Image (cartoon, grey):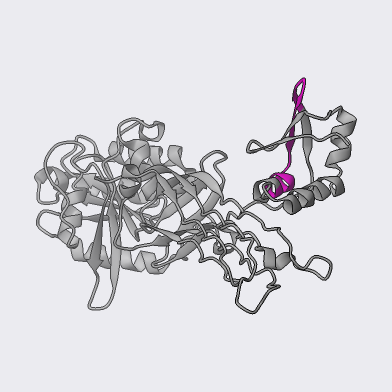
Amino acid sequence: MFYDEAKIYLRSGDGGDGMISFRREKFVPYGGPDGGDGGKGGDIVFKVNPKLNSLSKFRRQVHFKAGRGVHGVRQNMTGARGETLILEVPPGTILREAESGRLLADLTNEDQDRVLLEGGEGGRGNARFASSTNQAPKIAERGQPGVEMWVTMELKLIADAGLVGKPNAGKSTLLSAISSAKPKVANYPFTTLQPSLGVVQVDDYETIVVADIPGLIEGAADGVGLGHDFLRHIERTRVLIHLLDGAAFSPLDDLDAINEELKLYNIDLEKKPQIVVLNKMDLPDAQAWEPILQEEVEARGYEFMSISAATGENTRQLIFRLKQMIEALPEPKLAIDEDEMVIIRPKSDPNQFQITQMGPNEWMVRGERIEQIANQTYFEFDETALRFQRIIERMGISDELKEAGVQGGDTVWFGPEVELEWQAE
């Protein structure tokens, strides 16, 4: 089934923990530290696959997580990098941050790929902390957490030309007549419940892509019928083929009604190059309408043609004219330029912190840097605990806690994960 919207949860991989280890070899009684670094967490990458035309995969599965970096090992060996998660999407997919609506990426080109979330860095092993004054450090770091985010996905089909018009105008019949696409065709409203793409062969070398946009009705710009679900696909097309039903009661009223809906949805759609095509010229009603419509349409500033999709009359002429119009237009603009696309990285470590009293004997310290250090500290080892104590003293956290009134035996939280007992001096 066709889906052009989805909301998914993403999390890049956590970095692996650094290791505390010392060489233990025969004839080497004083082996030094050899704990390796943890591996970097896996990234989340979006890749364009031109064979896809729907976001249906992301309706069946919502949560996606990249691999965690492997912990460091002995002999100064860095843990393996976490597995990168590659998510394939159809061309024309737009990614936004769900919470803010911020535009993150516009994926249009074949085989284009984009790192969206970077994995966390691996923690350093104790070999990194050796110095002339401390040759046997029992200090290492835990890996940095990855990034998590809810992302909305929106698909806008990429086509050279878009077929628009009232239901039953004959759009699906025309698409099947000029291309190899085989949309369902029948004589009732809303036959086409999803957009269809057809590749039209102009000559031996050149092709154009035409999208059959489901029939629009009055109120579509306000979400009536299937309006909002499909109007977005017109935004990507470069030329509009406005197909009129030659057997309708008033094809001219249909033209005005659909153009009004396009303008209400996005005023730029009204400015998009448009060729108005009267269909069903094999019927007497269409033949009677032709001279009247040609005069009225050209007075409105549009090109006019008449065809019969059922018999193929004038369809080749329509293809050649479309090709000429497309070649005369500049390349379409992306929603966001390549160099403006966003890579979400694990947050930096600002020194700011905030102390809050949670209760009579309970305190909370929040701050990106101190929370990261607390999460990466092995409190089971005296040296790493002392290192943490020195860090909070250097950052001024100890002084501010004392000034706030912390007492020996109080509980001090460093973020939601690390709970410590305050020791009185």
Tell me, yes or no, if residue 104 can be seen here.
yes
Figure quadrant of residue 168: top left
Q: Position of residue 407 (x, y in %)?
A: 84, 28
Tell me, yes or no, if residue 314 can be seen here.
no
Figure quadrant of residue 160: bottom left
Q: Quadrant of the N terminus?
A: top left
The vertical placement of 234 against 320, above or below, is above
How many circles with numbers are drawn on the protein? 0
Q: Say which of 124 and 317 sits in front.
A: 124
Q: Position of residue 411 (x, y in %)?
A: 73, 30
Magenta residues span: 357-373
Q: Position of residue 363 (x, y in %)?
A: 75, 29
Q: Say which of 186 and 255 sits in front.
A: 186
Left or right, 386 with respect to 281, comes to right
Q: Say which of 211 and 107 sits in front.
A: 107
Figure quadrant of residue 77: bottom right
Q: Say which of 56 and 403 sits in front.
A: 403
Q: Residue at x 30, y 39 (%)?
A: 216
Left or right, 304 with respect to 412, comes to left
The vertical placement of 125 against 9, above or below, is below
* The furthest residue to the top: 360
Left or right, 248 with respect to 23, comes to left
Q: Position of residue 38 (x, y in %)?
A: 58, 62
* Magenta-drawn stretch contains 371: yes
Q: Residue at x 19, y 62 (%)?
A: 179
* Magenta-drawn stretch contains 392: no
The vertical placement of 217 against 28, above or below, is above
Q: Quadrant of the C terminus?
A: top right
